[in-house]
Amino acid sequence: MNKLAAVIAVIAGAILSGQCAIWGACLGGHDPNAGYPFPDFKGAVLFLIGVSVIPIVVAVFTTIVRRFLSARLLSFRIPIPVAVLLFGPLFSLAMGYSVQARDNRTKDHEEKYYAQQKEAYSRFAAQLTADPSIVFRERWFERKLEIQHGADVSARQMVFKDSFQPSHMAVAYTGEQLREISERAQENRLFVVCHPMCPPDLLEALWPLVFGGFFLLKNKDVRRRRNS
């Protein structure tokens, strides 16, 4: 195989590999126009991988296979440029499809998680609205890792935080319950201030923390602007 034909085969194989990577993703469900008017970044990355990485992988794989061929088959060895042209697009097609399949599984898992979280949120909100003392019996104020405990714990934490804001939920906490929450869940004391039934003395005691948190956030914002 002469050099010109080898170069043409490698270039054609690389371009076809890049395009086949996109086609493979589309076969798996990828929509290249989903982000319009923004470009298809995922397709661009797959194309670059197909153009640059897949031909190298095919060349290395072909070299390894050729080394292990028996002496009887050595005369039938396929040239590496031809292997890139023939097998590169197939490798890229499979790669693009597998990447999209993995993304589909991740998306399905996230959609299932958020659906469970939404259902759990409605359930916990109804329980808390009917009986605010449930936060003490079941210790809703204890923080747990959402990753380890799933959508139910995440939804319950969201309900607990939203229960102090009238714009989100109408939970009839008593003054004593708010006082107990501020003592047993100190990391959530600032939420207690937002509740309309917060006792005046508790509000007065927590007010410095409110200002402290406000100025802390403001200072962080100022530092972020300076650094940018």
Image: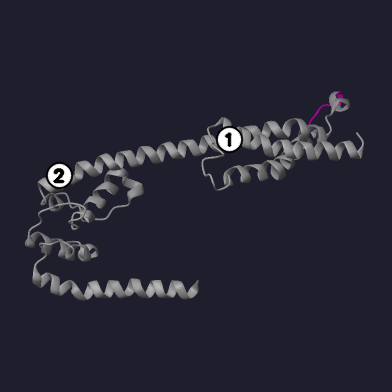
Which residue corresponds to the image point at 73% horizontal and 31% vertical from the top-left? 87
Is residue 101 found left or right of 214 in the rendered image?
right
Query: Colour scheme in the image?
Result: one colour
For disc 2, the marked residue is 127
Secondary structure under tag 1 reads helix
Badge 1 amino acid: Ala
| Circle nearer the viewer, 2 or 1 | 1
Give the quadrant of residue 208.
bottom left
**Residue most toward the front?**
37
Give the class, few, some or many, for how many residues have Cα within 10 Å of label 1's Cα (few <14, many ≥20). Answer: many
Front residue of 73/217: it is 217
> Closer to the camera, 76 or 100?
100
Expressed as whole percent of the image width and height from the top left, the position of residue 223 reads 43, 75
Residue at 86 percent of width and 37 percent of height:
6
Q: Is residue 176 left or right of residue 74?
A: left
Query: What label sits on residue 25 in the rendered view?
Result: 1
